[in-house]
Image: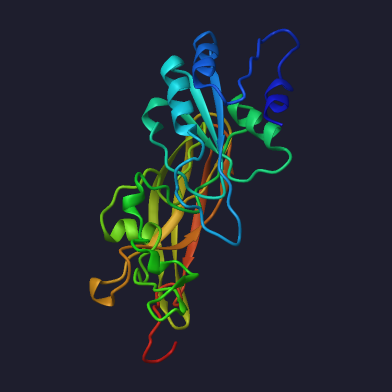
Amino acid sequence: NVIGGICAPLPPGAVNVTYSDGSDPAAAAALAAAADVAIVVVATTSSEGSDRPSLALPAAQDAYVAAVAKAQSNTVVVVRSPGAVLMPWVDDVPAIVATFMPGQEAGHAMADVIFGDANPSGRLPLTFLASESDSWLTSEAMYPGVKDPNGNLAAHYTEGLEMGYRWMDAKNIEPLFPFGHGLSFSSFVYSDLQVTGSVSPTSSATVSFTVTNAAGPSGSDVPQLYIAFPQSAGEPPKLLRGFQKVSMGPGGSARVSLPLTARDCSIFSNDKDD
């Protein structure tokens, strides 16, 4: 559990850990004000058979985070969720750890990251919105399981190819956290970009560059390769075509080479069904 994970690496008696069960924001704020650091764990759930009614955290958890953050400037928020959530308090806390659905070792894993024993390297597999009004799901008719005027179940995918980060780029909407985002305790610098070869039905190009761990401890980075088609193609502004995880020590460098194939540079044709 969370408390067990936080307490496990601490020497006995060295740190005083207090706990609030989340039912009383004022009591939690009082505990936070008397502490050096506050850790708030928030969560939401979902299921295969239904959609969440909102991206907001349920049960007034946002107010709880706001109360603790107001009382304690050193507040870490740990988010356990099956997907993106809204974070109206994002500018009031210095650190957010997104664990998604972490399993039985969640407490220990969370403590490893918070105490700096593990250097996080994950990247978001989705987009976190600043507001629900930024979503590409603009009407109830776009959800499966909704009946049309004739009483038939139908889903209308009027967003076309523009979903997730593609929608945000196409509509020039700034996300809260973009697809592929993720921070670590290291700072990585890219240099020496080169493109060799050419793309044809029988050959591929290679995009190469150097990643350097310019500051911080040993860590891993996940560089990503996106391409853009001519506007006349009717494709989203940019499309993910490759990524690679690389690890290096302090001051170390790694050369990354990502292939770009004919398939990567192709789009589906309705006329040719290919």
From the viewer's perspective, is residue 21 above or below residue 206? above
Tell me which residue sits at (26%, 72%) in the image.
230
Residue 61 % position (x, y): 49, 33
The x, y position of residue 99, in whole percent, is: 58, 41
In the drawing, does residue 134 fall left or right of residue 50?
A: left
Q: Is residue 264 left or right of residue 231?
A: right
Closest to the observer, 184 or 98? 98
- Judging depth in this view, the residue of 147 and 106 nearest the camera is 147
36 above or below 146? above
Q: Which quarter of the picture shows residue 176?
A: top left
**Is residue 94 visible in this depiction of the protein?**
no
User: Which quadrant holds the C terminus?
Assistant: bottom left
Image quadrant in which the N terminus is located: top right
In terms of image quadrants, where is residue 4? top right
Q: Residue furthest bottom?
A: 272
Give the camera-side residue of 73 and 138: 138
Residue 68 image position (x, y, % from top left) = 47, 20
Q: Nearer the viewer, residue 190 or 155?
A: 155
Q: Position of residue 104 (x, y in %)?
A: 74, 40
Q: Is residue 70 above or below residue 208?
A: above
The residue depicted at 63 percent of the width and 46 percent of the height is 101
Q: Is residue 135 above or below residue 121?
A: below
Look at the image and tell me whether residue 119 can be seen: yes
